[in-house]
Amino acid sequence: VPNLRFPEFEGEWQEKRLSDIADLSKGIGISKDQLSADGEPCILYGELYTKYKSETIKEVISKTNIDNTKLVKSKANDVIIPCSGETAEEIATARCVLKDDILLGGDLNIIRLHGYDGSFMSYQLNGKRKYDIAKVAQGVSVVHLYGEHLKNIKTINPSLNEQKKIANLLSLLDERISTQNKIIDKLQSLIKG
């Protein structure tokens, strides 16, 4: 149990392996050259490093109009982690998809939680668990990470309501930090200009 806690919650947090609280699967290939100006919203693994910096994906940027009958679609609350990257630390990047029916490209691990909050899990996996994930990633010049590697990652979880409240607070803090950074950038550009 953390030292700082919302007063309305009590009780011990439960330790669970990812395989005990989620189904682990993989996205199916969508390549960068299959992106288009219109079509279905989609997420490619590389975008987790470049376009989606927050733990939650609220708005999806990319689209594709390829035949999606055999592709994997998100369920709101899914957590996604890249299957490959340049370093073990880099690959341990989790994002929660907040919307249903987003096409999830190949080279994405999908963690479909059962009764757990995806945003909270994303924060947890990007925090203390990031190093546990990095330890199970394999490879040297290109690092790989699959569901088989993720299934034994231990998580520590409060009740669902407490998870949601914690994730909401962290999200609000992230938004505040982002806003302040934009103000700082604007001031710095005015000083230079």
Image (spheres, helix red, strand yellow):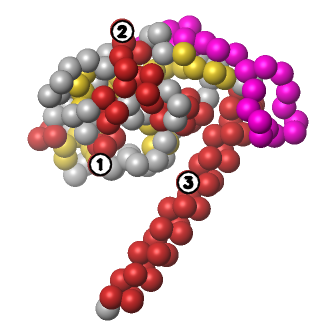
Q: Secondary structure at mark 1?
A: helix
Quadrant location of the N terminus? Answer: top right
> Which residue position is annotated with label 2?
148
Q: Position of residue 78 (x, y in %)?
A: 48, 27
Please name the residue shown 63% across and 40% down the image: 167
Tell me, yes or no, whether the highlighted magenta stretch contains residue 21: yes
First reached walking from the N terminus: tag 1 or tag 3: 1
- Characterize the local packing of mark 1: few (<14), some (14-19) or many (20 or more) Cα atoms within 10 angstroms: few
| Residue type at the position of mark 2 | Glu
Q: Amino acid at mark 1?
A: Thr
What is the spatial separation of the Cα atoms under label 2 and label 3, in whole angstroms?
31 Å
Quarter occupied by the C terminus: bottom left
Q: Would you say 30 lies left or right of 161 here?
A: left
State which region is magenta: 1-27
The residue that disc 1 covers is 50
In-front residue for pair 128/190: 128
Residue at image mark 3: 174
> Is residue 52 or residue 6 the one in the foreground?
6
